[in-house]
Image (cartoon, grey):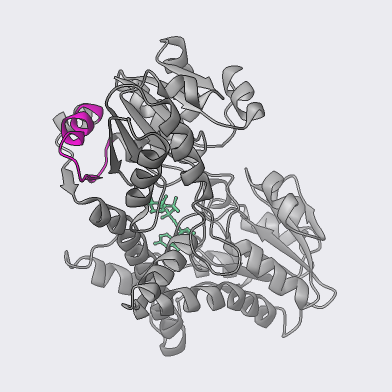
Amino acid sequence: MRIVMTGSGYVGLVSGACLADFGHEIICVDKDERKIAMLREGGVPIYEPGLKELIARNVDAGRLTFTTDLAGSVAQADVVFIAVGTPARRGDGHADLTYVYDASREIAASLNGFTVIVTKSTVPVGTGDEVERIIRETNPQAEFAVASNPEFLREGAAIQDFKRPDRIVVGIEDERARPVMEEVYRPLYLNQSPMLFTGRRTSELIKYAANAFLAMKITYINEIAELCEQVGADVQQVARGIGLDNRIGSKFLHAGPGYGGSCFPKDTLALVKTAEDAGAPVRLIETTVAINESRKRAMARKVIAICNGSVRGKTVAVLGLTFKPNTDDMRDAPSLSIIQALQDAGAQIRAYDPEGMEAASAMMKDVEFAANPYIAAEGAAAVVLVTEWDALRALDLKRLRGVMAGDGLIDLRNIYRPDDAEAAGFVYASVGRGA
Ligand code: UGA
């Protein structure tokens, strides 16, 4: 099959490379000439484990190419995916669909023979209808069907998630799209991954409903963690105790500083707006959004408490900046709010992250970046662990304590044992471990 991937960002590149690996012929398109030039030279603009090798292998096999020419690519395609960005619109939180609609217009003009246009970007309910209307208006003669195929990839585990998905969701309104989409995913289908065909609007909602549920699950355990701290209970044991109930499930019950990233904050907000507009407000999610926002900043209070009530004029070392490990993505990372709150309270920040410092330096003011955790901690009153990178899981706590001026260790991911931290001379705080 000839498949065009419109948008060579995170979703487009991972999906394009994986589909090429299935044996399809993939053209990844992007407007950004620098990005396409870099990809053509073997570079990869994002950090995702295994992606560079996967791209190289498929480029060498002649199945994966990169171009800025969308029109020329579409003319020969069986399937055209739209995987462009849908950022939150400034001001009202609605998803900004400008890029999706611009791409639709461009694709429409070059369609040639029956083509399935598939939205992979996370788009509000009804977007597929609008894409169809735009294409029909731009090119009344075109033979096409518009499908919705949301992606459920996690950054850091995206290739595995693509190749071994829990399910594939496809929303269609035109039966001609069904065999085409079955062919796209045939290798997975044969691998027994369930493929769920629904109406287009249902498929669009499944994506938001799934992400909002997961965000709510995390927020729930974060609130239980607060309660644990007050009543002398241990949130990790509570999570295990409830997670063993199959109806609840053990995943996404790790208490932490609040969820971040490019998906949960944006998608929960967009669902709230859609539901509001539809007159069916999702109050659980409205509350989830509010709790998560205040939680991120509240984490700074833990740090201030350990520093005897004030961080004014003191250095605080922040270890782990990205919204989660194995990515260089800083979008809506809890570290941004925590650092801002600490700076507002008068602290000097020194930070370290294995992959995220370049992106972080563009988003943070007055932060000094260090080459490793020990340099970051030199002379610090406290160290805050914000992201659970493997490289931060086995720090030499005695050495760390030795270079510091103070003795605070605030472990927002519960990666150390309280006894070990105390034995190394730390005053230790973590999340939800009141017992
Ligand atoms: C999320 C979903 O997990 C994917 O299924 C979905 O496809 C993707 O959004 C998307 O819509 O594109 P992602 O944002 O990459 O994936 O990362 P997650 O692993 O879900 O983590 C999100 C945030 O929740 C992180 O800040 C993480 O630290 C936090 N989290 C996650 C917790 O605090 N506790 C948990 O138990 C799990």
- At x 62%, y 52%, the residue is 396
Query: Quick check: can you spot residue 220?
Result: no
- Looking at the image, which is closer to me, 141 or 402? 141
Residue 106 versus residue 229 in the image, above or below: above
- At x 64%, y 75%, the residue is 300
Residue 244 occupies which quadrant of the picture?
Answer: bottom left
Q: Quadrant of the C terminus?
A: bottom left
Q: Magenta residues?
A: 164-184
Residue 180 lies in the magenta stretch: yes
Q: Which quadrant of the render holds ligand 1?
A: bottom left
Residue 42 lies in the magenta stretch: no
- Looking at the image, which is closer to me, 111 or 355? 111
Q: Tell me how many marks there are.
A: 0
- Residue 113 in the figure: left or right of residue 227: left
Residue 110 occupies which quadrant of the picture?
Answer: top left
Residue 365 versus residue 48 in the image, above or below: below
